[in-house]
Amino acid sequence: MNQIDGFGEAFEALIENLIDEAAPLRAALLYRLSEPTQEDIGKLRGVWESVPVERRRLLLSRMVEASETAYDFNFSTVAIFALDDEDHQVRQSAVEALWEDEQPATMRRILRVLELDKSAPVRAAAATSLGRFILAGELGTLAKRLQSEVEDALLEICLAGEEELEVLCRALESMAYSEREEVAELIKEAQTHDHVKMQASAIFAMGRNADERWGLDVLNALKHPVPEIRFEASRAAGELMLADAVPILIGFLEDPDREIKHAAIWSLGEIGGRAAQQALFELSKNETDDDILETIEDAMNMAALGSGEFVTYVFTDPEREDFNDIDPDPFMFEDDFDD
């Protein structure tokens, strides 16, 4: 067995590494804590309070990162007991580390965090996390009665309006997955909220809600003077497949705001069409940022897939010095697929 997984050595040695603030946190510990044995989790619990807070924070943040990049990791067991940690940053990361866990017991545990945790950022993380259970209910992978438990809790927060702004925003965004009739009114009210963050959440919710009724609102938001609103509108335009937004999104490809540029690229890929693809291709010829090139590559492949083109665009090949070998008109065979 590969030694990096941590099973070839005593767990106590990995615990010592966790406690030692001067030592780099070993990857072997993460491997060992993915679906740990009862014996290992018992030992971790026994020393948890003696682990320095910065090391607990580091461990949980590494778990979040690992779970988002490698789907074979499962840190639910550790994350569940870390929800009771005295440090709010540890608890927040624990909620985030549970992002793939759709067990009813986990759902109810996160509901308790939403209701009882003293930290607003932790409650906000819980509100975000609960959105996946509503989506699971809509997709038919979670019982409707369980979906309703989550919707009732989030709806109560939204209607009362007495929570911290961050929690209210995240609750609205999660409720947007729901087909409950109250959702549309909540989104409309958030549009006219005094705080721009709630207005931005309203636009985010429109895209997630995926109802064509929001098309004109999102188009108008693309022209909003506040960058945060334009960013959310750029993303929502792609989720709603707004063809009318393509000219504005093409203009955003030159936006100095990097996040707006990324969102515009992504949405052009989602919407597709010749104009969107051509604009993305032109952008790729002069772009030098590898991160943006990768986003363009993904977007163009998505657009090609959506149109039925049998094309794969690769702009981030490390061996490539320039793009002179790319066909200057990648759409020259587009008519071949019109039938």
Image (cartoon, grey):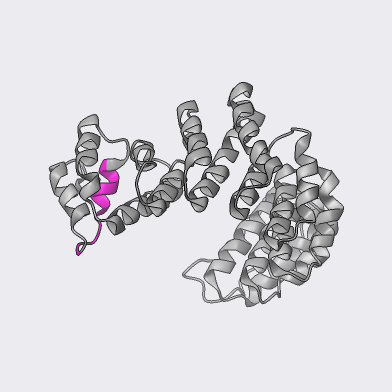
Residue 325 among magenta residues: no
Q: Is residue 60 left or right of residue 49?
A: right
Q: Is residue 54 left or right of residue 127?
A: left
Where residue 270 sits: x, y (%)?
A: 71, 52
User: Image height check: is 225 above or below 110?
Assistant: below
Residue at (22% x, 53% y) in the render = 18
Where residue 33 sits: x, y (%)?
A: 28, 41
Where residue 42 sits: x, y (%)?
A: 22, 34
Residue situated in front as seen by the camera: 321 or 171: 171
Q: Is residue 142 left or right of residue 277?
A: left
Residue situated in front as seen by the camera: 317 or 124: 124
* Quarter that holds the C terminus: top right
Residue at (70% x, 56% y) in the render = 198
Camera sees residue 137: yes
Residue at (67% x, 37% y) in the render = 155
Residue situated in front as seen by the camera: 207 or 81: 81
Residue at (55% x, 73% y) in the render = 289
Camera sees residue 338: no
Q: Is residue 13 left or right of residue 203?
A: left
* Quarter that holds the N terminus: top left
Q: Number of labelled discs?
A: 0
User: Image height check: is 268 above or below 116?
Assistant: below
Residue 30 among magenta residues: yes
User: Image height check: is 267 above or below 9?
Assistant: below
Query: What range of the chain is rendered magenta?
Result: 22-32
- Picture quadrant of residue 314: bottom right
Where residue 214 sits: x, y (%)?
A: 82, 49
